[in-house]
């Protein structure tokens, strides 16, 4: 029986996010410049066997939940094989993935069969032309097909992540919230952060959670607390009679450092204890 490991601030560390690649087929304006980022060479990227080995060690130290991310995880060939390796690790209770959804429809069945349990899909707009503007190359129909496929094969609850940016997509907040009523979607609204090499994050572009929530309540009625889904920083609510939930991830307006339970493994094998710190450990 593994005891949960706590860090020096007594936070139980149970969650590992694994970036399987730094590559992506999209160029979301808040995440990457149009020309992309300088890419790591294939020799620098951990092989799937190396990732599996590190996860096995991490599970032995108390990690119970792993999320695959990137870059775009489905842009790396053979991801189903990695999922199968990880799903077979005794003690790993939850195996999830965050994806932009564009490549999901064709792989959802194989991923579910290999042992993936859930996906979070990033979708910032339901307008095809706007999706093109935000991602610079994505197609709405592909993402919607990905969401549909995830639900069909049981990669559920499928959560939709919407990064809210003022004057880019904040006028769609209510439309997304309405989907929790009409389609049972679980939607999470994320405050845009001045991260990486994206062009967003200027103070004027960030919409505080309080403002997002007020837009929803004014249009659709009061939010009621929902049972906690997941063990991350999101806080969950529900509209009356909604099957789906509404989550808020508020890295800027409500610091959640005290609740942090995660470590990050980069595609080239560095362990990052905190996104806001330069501290890292090269596991290679
Ligand atoms: N490519 C996958 C995707 O888009 O879902 C996985 C990697 S992406 C970096 C993970 C999540 O981070 C996505 O939900 C994305 O919307 C979010 N994200 C990226 N840049 C962000 C930023 N500057 N502020 C807030 N969230 C951001
Ligand atoms: Fe790619 Fe995800 Fe970044 Fe968009 S948010 S550019 S899909 S890694």
Image (spheres, rainbow, N blue to C red):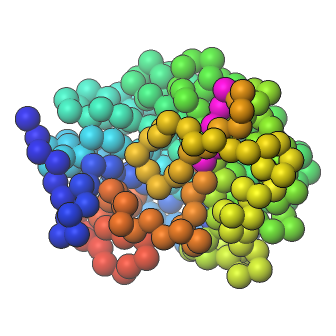
Residues 220 and 23: in front is: 220
- Quadrant the N terminus occupies: top left
In the image, is 231 to the left or to the right of 23? left
Could you say which quadrant of the image residue 81 lies in?
top left
Q: Is residue 202 above or below residue 231?
A: below
Give the x, y percent position of residue 211. 74, 64
The residue shown at (35%, 34%) is 94
The residue shown at (50%, 36%) is 227
How many numbered badges does the structure rendering display? 0
- Quadrant the C terminus occupies: bottom left
Q: Is residue 116 visible?
A: yes
The residue shown at (40%, 46%) is 231
Q: Is residue 176 visible?
A: no
Q: Is residue 145 above or below residue 64?
A: above
Query: Is residue 29 located in the magenta-colored stretch of the structure?
Result: no
Q: Is residue 26 above or below residue 282?
A: above
Give the x, y percent position of residue 256. 44, 65
Range covered by the magenta-colored residues: 243-247
Give the x, y percent position of residue 47. 32, 48
Residue lying farthest left? Answer: 1
Residues 78 and 88: in front is: 88
The residue shown at (63%, 58%) is 190
Could you say which quadrant of the image residue 274 lies in?
bottom left
Q: Is residue 72 above or below residue 39?
A: above
In the image, is 264 to the left or to the right of 91? right
Give the x, y percent position of residue 210. 69, 64
In the image, is 213 to the left or to the right of 257? right
Query: Is residue 245 located in the magenta-colored stretch of the structure?
Result: yes
């Amino acid at each position: 029986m593994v005891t949960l490991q706590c860090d020096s601030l007594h936070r139980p560390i149970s969650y590992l996010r694994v970036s399987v690649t730094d590559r992506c087929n999209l160029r979301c304006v808040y995440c990457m410049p149009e020309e992309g980022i300088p890419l790591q060479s294939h020799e620098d990227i951990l092989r799937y066997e190396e990732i599996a080995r590190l996860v096995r060690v991490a599970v032995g130290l108390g990690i119970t939940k792993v999320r695959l991310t990137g870059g775009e995880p489905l842009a790396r060939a053979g991801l189903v094989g990695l999922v199968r390796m990880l799903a077979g690790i005794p003690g790993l209770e939850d195996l999830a993935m965050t994806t932009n959804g564009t490549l999901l429809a064709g792989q959802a069945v194989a991923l579910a069969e290999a042992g993936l349990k859930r996906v979070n899909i990033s979708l910032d707009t339901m307008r095809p032309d706007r999706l093109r503007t935000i991602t610079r190359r994505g197609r709405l129909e592909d993402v919607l097909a990905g969401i549909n496929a995830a639900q069909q094969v049981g990669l559920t609850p499928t959560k939709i992540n919407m990064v809210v940016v003022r004057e880019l997509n904040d006028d769609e907040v209510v439309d997304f919230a309405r989907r929790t009523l009409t389609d049972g979607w679980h939607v999470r609204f994320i405050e845009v952060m001045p991260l990486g090499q994206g062009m967003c994050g200027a103070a004027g572009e960030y919409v505080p959670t309080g403002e997002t929530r007020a837009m929803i309540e004014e249009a659709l009625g009061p939010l009621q607390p929902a049972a906690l889904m997941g063990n991350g920083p999101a806080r969950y609510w529900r509209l009356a009679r909604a099957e789906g939930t509404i989550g808020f991830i508020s890295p800027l307006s409500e610091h959640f450092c005290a609740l942090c339970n995660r470590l990050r493994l980069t595609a080239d094998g560095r362990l990052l204890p905190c996104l806001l710190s330069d501290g890292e450990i090269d596991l290679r």
